[in-house]
Image (cartoon, rainbow, N blue to C red):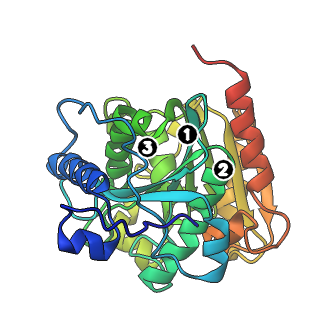
């Protein structure tokens, strides 16, 4: 694990020496902070020209101290809390490998959420689990990005999808600063995040400028709520069930032409399994049959990628998908 080391250089602020931050890293950090603040009121009107080495500013995984996370995150650096929209919830984190690549790397974008109102786990634990997935991306020659978005009941349909669109616009405009390739973004939607990603694809009216992706992985999502909608679903979609069909991913998802990997878990509820099976059957009927996977467990995005040691994970089909995107040689 890479950590910031004390320097003791003459002329550095006392607080910087105590924190182990060099003057060069201080300046770079404040440049990054300026970029983040500038985007707090929406997408930046113009790109900044960062100094060389912007990514390597000493931002590390110091705050992910769990044993499994620390092991998976060796040689991985985090840039945290980058603002992509107006809300305080509109932030994203980026994970990059310390091993420099000669060419821009594909981007694995994680949009997660157990429910529309939030995760079942404590926020810090949920972040550590998601960090493992981001480090999986970085250690497999990709750029890992995690998007936070506004939650119900304060945020209702279609705010989740429009937040994802805004984040994608930010990524398209800035991911090259982290050696990412905006032409090779694979969006991984998990739980409620799967609905937000699928909604964005199915409803072109929500797609902001440069909000496209090269492929998607949808894990254990709902795609059309019914009269038996949960409280969480009602908090986001509203209580008027007559609106649910219009607010579903059908029929728009049938017009999507990017590769789709569809997955659900053996321990998902019967309703979630039925949602996945229905989406797969409908896509196959439209001639766009997705690659699918049955997971052993959905207890966290890290489990979905087999980072807990379990089998039957999304790791192999996702890596295969990314390598196929790289091989097709986008101009």
Query: Residue pushed farthest right?
Result: 311
Residue 211 visible in the picture:
no
Q: Position of residue 67 (x, y in %)?
A: 64, 81
- The residue pinned by badge 2 equals 279
Closer to the eye: label 3 or 2: 3
Q: Residues within 10 Å of mark 2 (few under 14, many from 20)?
A: many
Residue 200 numbered mark, or none: 3
Q: Secondary structure at mark 3?
A: helix
Which residue is identified by label 1? 253
Q: Position of residue 32 (x, y in %)?
A: 26, 49
Please identify the residue farthest to the bottom as the structure is shown: 122
Q: Secondary structure at mark 1?
A: helix
Q: Is residue 4 above or below residue 83?
A: below
In the picture, the quarter occupied by the C terminus is top right
Q: Are marks 1 and 2 in contact (CB under 8 Å)?
A: yes
Between marks 1 and 3, how big is the CA–CA gap?
9 Å
Q: CA distance from mark 1 to mark 2?
A: 9 Å
């Amino acid at each position: 694990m890479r950590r910031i080391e004390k320097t003791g250089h003459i002329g550095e602020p006392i607080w910087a020496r105590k924190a182990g931050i060099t003057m060069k890293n201080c300046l770079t950090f404040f440049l990054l902070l300026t970029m983040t603040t500038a985007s707090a009121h929406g997408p930046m009107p113009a790109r900044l020209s960062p100094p060389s080495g912007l990514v390597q500013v000493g931002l590390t995984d110091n705050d992910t101290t769990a044993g499994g996370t620390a092991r998976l995150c060796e040689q991985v650096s985090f840039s945290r809390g980058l603002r992509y929209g107006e809300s305080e919830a509109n932030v994203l984190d980026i994970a990059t490998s310390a091993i420099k690549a000669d060419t821009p790397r594909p981007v694995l974008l994680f949009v997660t959420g157990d429910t529309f109102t939030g995760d079942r786990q404590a926020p810090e634990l949920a972040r550590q689990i998601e960090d493992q997935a981001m480090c999986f991306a970085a250690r497999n020659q990709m750029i890992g990005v995690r998007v936070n978005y506004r939650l119900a009941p304060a945020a209702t349909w279609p705010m989740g999808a429009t937040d994802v669109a805004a984040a994608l616009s930010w990524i398209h405009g800035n991911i090259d600063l982290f050696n990412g390739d905006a032409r090779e973004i694979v969006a991984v939607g998990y739980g409620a995040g799967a609905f937000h990603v699928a909604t964005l694809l199915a409803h072109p009216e929500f797609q902001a400028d440069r909000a496209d992706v090269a492929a998607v992985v949808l894990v254990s999502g709902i795609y059309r709520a019914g009269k038996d909608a949960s409280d969480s679903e009602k908090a986001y979609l509203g209580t008027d069930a007559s609106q649910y069909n219009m607010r579903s991913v059908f029929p728009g998802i049938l017009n999507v032409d990017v590769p789709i990997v569809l997955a659900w878990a053996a321990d998902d509820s019967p309703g979630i399994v039925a949602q996945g099976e229905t989406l797969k059957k409908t896509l196959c009927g439209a001639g766009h049959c997705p690659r699918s996977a049955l997971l052993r467990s959905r207890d966290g995005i890290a489990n979905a990628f087999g980072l807990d040691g379990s089998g039957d994970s999304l790791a192999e089909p996702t890596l295969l998908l990314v390598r196929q995107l790289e091989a097709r040689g986008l101009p």
